[in-house]
Each structure stands twice: as C-alpha cells, then as structure tokens.
Amino acid sequence: MKLQETSKRKSQTSEPLKGDATKAAILDAALEVAEVSGLQGITIGVLAEKTSMSKSGVFAHFRAREDLLVEVVREYHRRFEQIVFEPALELAKGLPRLKKMIATWLEITSAAESTGSVFITGPIEFDDQPGVIRDALVQSVEIWRQALLRSINESIQLGHLKDTADPDVILFQIYSYVLGVHHDVRFLHVEKSLATAKRLIEEMFSQHLNNQ
Amino acid sequence: MKLQETSKRKSQTSEPLKGDATKAAILDAALEVAEVSGLQGITIGVLAEKTSMSKSGVFAHFRAREDLLVEVVREYHRRFEQIVFEPALELAKGLPRLKKMIATWLEITSAAESTGSVFITGPIEFDDQPGVIRDALVQSVEIWRQALLRSINESIQLGHLKDTADPDVILFQIYSYVLGVHHDVRFLHVEKSLATAKRLIEEMFSQHLNNQ
C-alpha cells in the first residue's frame, strides 16, 4: 500500500486547478524522496529534477524549504488518516475499530515499497531540532496517538477490555511494537517480526479481555 | 551518561600519538554532531569548524566522508560496548547480566544530553540507503542483538527463565520497548514511558520466571 497513490487516484477523479495540480505533484515527489532519504533528503533541487520543473518554479509554490517540509508533513498526515484511520471508522467502536487501526498501521509500516513511516522517521530526524517542522511532526503524531487512545478508552468503556487496563500503557505497548516492526523489517529485513508483533498485541489484548 | 566522555577520559590518562589524538578529536566532534543532527549531519565542513581545523586537515585523516561515517559508527560501537556491555560482564551470567544490560541501555537511550542512540537513529537514516555506512550499522546492531540473545539463552540454560520462553520474541519485546522509550522521551518528552518500559520488561520476565 503506497501512500503516494492516494492523491494520484484523487487527481484522476477530480479536476483541480492547474496550480493546485502542480503543487500536488511537487508534494507527491517530495513524499517519494522522503521514502528513501527521509524529510532531510527533500531539497528544492531534487524536487525540481523529479518534477522536471525549474527551481524557481518549485519555489513559486512554497516560500521556503521549511514551509515545503511542513506541508509534506501535513499531506502525509492527510493520507495516513485516509488509509489507516478512516477505514477503521466503518467498524464498530471499541476493540474491532482499534484492532483495524493497528492492523492497517502495521501493514503500511512493514511494506517495503511504502513511505508508511514519516511518523516514525520524522521524529528521529527532528528529535533534537526545534522548529516548525518538528512542531508539525509532534502535532501529527499526537493526533494519531489521541485517536488510538480514544479507541482504547472506548474499548474499556464498552466493556471489551477490563477497566483495570491502563490506556497509556497499552498505547506504549502498541507504539513500541510498531516501532520494533519498522526497525526489524525495514532495517534488518527480519520479516518474522511482523508476525511476532501481531501475536504479542493479541496476547496483550487477551490479558485485558473482559470475559464476564 | 554521555558517550563522548569516554574517549576524553581515555585521552587524559594515556598518551596517544599526535595523529591519533587529532583523529580522536575529530571523531569526538563527529559524535557530538550526530547527537543533534544524526549521522547525515556530519560533514567535513562542520567538523573543520568544530575542531578549528582546515577542511584539508580533516580530510587528511579520512579519505572520504563515507569512510569517516563508517569510523564514527565503529567508534560509537566501541563506546557503547564500554558503557552498556562491559559493566554487565561483572554480574553473574543469565538474568542478572541481562537485566544490567537492559537497564544501562534504557538509561543512555532516555538521557536527554546523550548520543545514546546512533544504533537507533542510524538505522532510520540509512534503512533505504544501501552502502558501507548501512553495512557498518547493520553489523554493529547485529553484534549488540547477538549479545542480548546470548544472554537470554544463558538465562534459559541456567534455569532462570523457563525453557518455554522464546528468545527471539523476548529480544523483540526488549528492543521494541527501548525504541518506544527513545521515541516518547526524546521526541514527545513523555518522560514516564521510561518507568512504563521498565515495568513491562519486569512483567515480561516474571511471566517466564522459573519458579521450580
């Protein structure tokens, strides 16, 4: 599942203004660069080359590289929501929805040909670099964490999970296992960690299941 | 605990050749840069400025930036072993040694003013960039993982943990929780995740404790 495909599909079915289409093409190219070289790898020069535009043409759409990177984070966020969050809304609140969110997230995180990880690589790139890009990343990651937390809380309120379960601890476990899968599969090519993570998350939920 | 301090202490107590001392100073500076901007942030220009040397002076010690980065990974590995691995060897084989390795690793990972994380940030920076730097990182990370795995296996062989425990799964859990702490403490400043990780690792060991 490639996050880039989303906007391509969109631009085939709607008719955006020419300026918007160009901007979307630049953002598409930027997300492709981020896939290989991280946000840090995105430069006006690289984007000009990828989109066959002049540097000043790229500049015309973004006042500065920093603005461009903030927009890349926001665009990534939009696509992440479309792919990971929105399909889960079709499932019942509580554990079914939560499990769907985690399953899709693990899928895009472990897919070799997917960006799937600006929310994972971005924080590492900018953890010690204060500024608008770091702020945009923190904001996006926090929105995603709040969505997960809300769903964990709903699982408890609806009685799917015992009320002794600690939502923050469950969030930490889920997040850590996804980071572990990203590390093992994408860096070490230890593919079996995806199955290990799925099993551990199932076991963690079993521990807290309400069997009344 | 700053990984940079190690070589400074060393250079005060021994008398290295002048060339070696200069090279060590360059590597020290490079590790300081990596702390803030990652391995990608290390350039000959930045190092020349930090060490008050000319660019050609820095170049004289490393044939190319790539060689320099490989040496930075190796130097980081040496310091990591000194700080995280070697002190654990003073404890009894099995669970005491394993727990000491994990405790020190968590400590340097969550310390704000520590590099502590080239083994975490490096893999993210180079996960999709084949080459000698990625190879050096994979090699270092694999050596560390094998040390953890050996200690997990010894814990089982010595009867500290049940023989139903799966060493690969335990390694994945430990590694994921450390990545989770790095993410939460350094990026989101959610400091309590360190205590959460410690508790989860204790609970995980409790599950597998041999109470015969």
Image (cartoon, coloured by chain):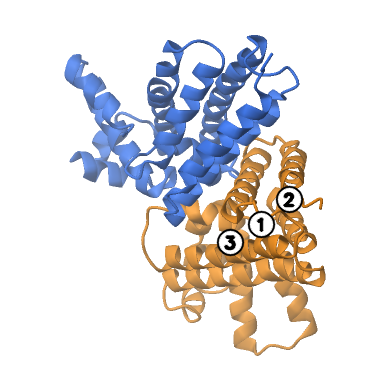
Chain colours: A orange, B blue
Closest to the observer, B110 or A12: B110
Give above or below for A82 relative to B207. Answer: below
Mark 3 or 2: in front is 3
Closest to the observer, A124 or A167: A167
Q: In which quarter of the image is the N terminus of chain A?
A: bottom right
Nearer the N terminus, badge 3 or badge 1? 1
Residue A88: percent from the left, percent from the top? Answer: 77, 67
Q: Which residue carries the number 1 mark? A: A116
* Residue B26 shows in the view: yes
Residue A150: percent from the left, percent from the top? Answer: 64, 66
Q: What element carries label 2?
A: loop
Q: Which residue carries the number 3 mark? A: A145
Give above or below for B5 relative to B40. Answer: above
Residue B136: percent from the left, percent from the top? Answer: 52, 29
Mark 3 vs mark 2: tell me if same chain.
yes
Chain ID of residue with mark 2:
A
Chain ID of residue with mark 1:
A
Residue type at mark 2: give it.
Answer: Ala
Residue type at mark 1: give it.
Answer: Gly
Side of B40 where A26 appears, left or right: right
Q: Which residue is drawn at 81% across and 68% down?
A: A92
Q: Distance between the residues labelled 3 and 2?
A: 21 Å
Q: Is mark 3 on a helix, strand or loop?
A: helix
